[in-house]
Image (cartoon, helix red, strand yellow):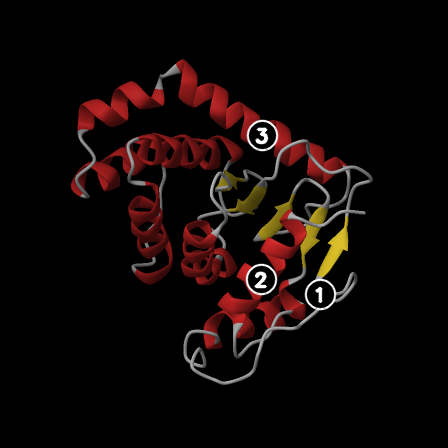
Amino acid sequence: MLKKLLVALVFAPVMAFASAAAPVQFQEGVHYDVVAEKATAKPEVLEFFSFYCPHCKAFEPFAQALDKNLPKGVSLTKHHVDFLQVAPPELQQSLAKAYVVAKNAGQGDRIADVIFDYLHNQRASFSSEQDIRNLLVVNDVPAMLFDSGMVSQAVNDEVAAMKKSQDHYSEAKVLRGVPTLIVNGKYQVKFSGLSQQNFQQDLDAVVAFLLTKKD
């Protein structure tokens, strides 16, 4: 499944001008799975991801475009997970905090691209929170902003909420890997069911469909 997903994500930009249309009707088990009995009270879109995940790097441009294409009042909330085996959970949590600091400063997408590039294109690594700080400061995040943000109660609360959400969906056996996209707490998008030729179009459409789906 991961190989199919990676193929879809890698080739979708190249084939974006193909003429195939998005499915007229999205089907359970093909384009999405039902993962909970009840939907959230308010529409929401959650993405679970990790900067260490190559599939998440490939998905990032689509996630950023999806966020811009969502209906008014709905945004994509990104939750950085800490369960990948490539780094200690504490370091992965520091990355989550650094991302939140950048996001709250209006630089989330830009810094996400910087971190993905650092880990996957430059094939560099982090050994400490100081390494993360150095990367962000070099990429125009003020040192004072980073330092104050990393100890901010608001930032720590937001990262704790990420962890709580991660644990909830992991215990429910919904979150088995990344990237994972969950709509209204009830539906999980199946990337493998979306068109390779029109991946962004299908992604936007299935999310819009699920946001308003009434059962």
Residues 22 and 102: in front is: 22
Residue topped by disc 1: 26
Can residue 128 be seen in this snapshot? no
Q: Residue at x 40, y 60 (%)?
A: 61
147 left or right of 25?
left
Residue topped by disc 3: 163
Q: Which mark is residue 205?
A: 2
Give, as a three-letter code, the residue at label 2: Ala
81 left or right of 172?
left
Give, as a three-letter code, the residue at label 1: Phe
Residues 181 and 70: in front is: 70
- Above or below: residue 51 compared with residue 103: below
Disc 1 and disc 2 in contact, CB within 8 angstroms: yes
Q: Residues within 10 Å of mark 1 (few under 14, many from 20)?
A: some
Q: Residue at x 50, y 37 (%)?
A: 88
Q: Residue at x 62, y 70 (%)?
A: 194
Q: Which comes sooner in the sequence, label 1 or label 2?
A: 1
130 left or right of 76?
left
Secondary element at tag 1? loop
Residues 200 and 162: in front is: 200
Give, as a three-letter code, the residue at label 3: Lys
The Cα–Cα distance between marks 1 and 2, rounded to whole angstroms, is: 9 Å
